[in-house]
Amino acid sequence: ALPYFSDSEPFPGFTTQAFPHERVELIDNLTEERARVGSYDPLTGYPASQQPGNQMTPDMDGFLGLGITSITRAIESASQWAVIDELGYLESSCPEFCDAVFRLFDQKQVIAVLRSQSTPFLDALRARNNVFVYDLDHPLLPIGCVIMASGLGKRFGSDKLMADFNGKPMISRILSATDGALFAARIVVTRSREVEAFCRERNIPVLLHAMPYRNHTVHLGLSALLREYPELAGCMFALGDQPLLARETIEAMVITFSQCCQTASPIFRLTAIDEDDSIIPGNPILFGNRYFEELLTLPDNQGGNVLLKKYPDNVRYFPAGDPLELADADTPAELEQLKKAEFNR
């Protein structure tokens, strides 16, 4: 089935269909025209030493004809998006077709499926600054999550994490947002016996402590995770008092980090984008494992901001879907405002 962006109009671009041991055809998404772009030939296909397992000979007429035509249609269409499924070594064999694909990437938002092999064409696409690569073979690295729940609630006047937020304790929001298979491990670090009891009743790992400073919460949480999962590639530090932080935002942040972390050592920080496009930094923050040693030895009463200042070029600001996701509830009045904001969304 062709990909559709409305009830009646498909996304522009093309798909390919393989007929085993026979041929590969390219199909224009808008017109459903077909053209042969590869033929199966075990005798004249690419040498196994160059392309293991490839026994297809490219058909240049298909790429130079319908292939480029379908890309041109996509560029000229009213849609902001184009879809390509897929690009591989056959497509890499036609320079004119490759140039057309680059033009499409320059002018449209493109969802494309790429084979995992390496060719100059595919490598150049993956290396583009405006391309996000999601590796289906290795979608997620093992990431931990420390939920920072050690505040005493002095401004709030009571244990704010157990305060009602539209029917449930506020702490339940971050617990729901970080639940599931997204994280290899998570732990709640708290000085509240009520929070501890709430977590234990739900079989959520929790650590009760009486240490005074923020660096102690970081150290205790990360140390506990590493004792159980020393292979962690990164760790997110999330606050317990951001009740509007969406699960989808956390998932997108972890998935994007997993892909970037395989070639770099980033620090991801959730941010909001103001009306004038200025960045408003917030929480959570996700650190790669190269920073673990420093996180475990932070100065007294200091948190991860020490590393944000030390490695500014490594910080990647990840935009939240809604600025309210960054809002915390330090006072009862702020809590009431966030309750109302949820209903008005």
Image (cartoon, grey):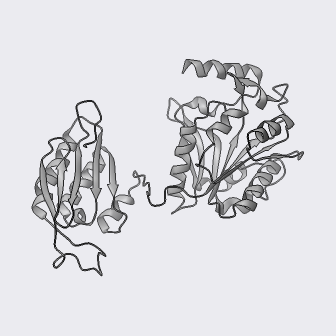
**Residue 18 position within the rendered picture, expressed as x and y whole percent measured from the top left:** 22, 59
The relative height of residue 153 versus residue 47 in the rendered view (above or below) is above
In this view, the residue in front, 130 or 190, is 190
Q: Where is residue 20 in the image (x, y as percent from the top left)?
A: 21, 64
Please tell me how many numbered marks the rendered image carries.
0
Seen in the image, is 254 located left or right of residue 212?
left
Quarter of the image for residue 280 reads top right
Foreground of the two, 329 or 26: 26
- x then y, percent, for residue 274: 53, 31
* Residue 53 sits in quarter: bottom left
Q: Where is residue 293 in the image (x, y as percent from the top left)?
A: 73, 62
Answer with left or right where residue 144 lies relative to residue 134.
Answer: right
Quadrant holding the C terminus: top right
Q: Which residue is drawn at 22% across and 65% down?
A: 90
Q: Which of 35 and 72 is in front in this view?
A: 35
Q: Quadrant of the N terminus?
A: top left
Residue at 63% over, 42% down: 178
Q: Which residue is drawn at 74% across and 23% down?
A: 164
From this view, report whether residue 307 is shown above or below residue 12.
below
Residue in the image at 70% along x and 19% along y = 336
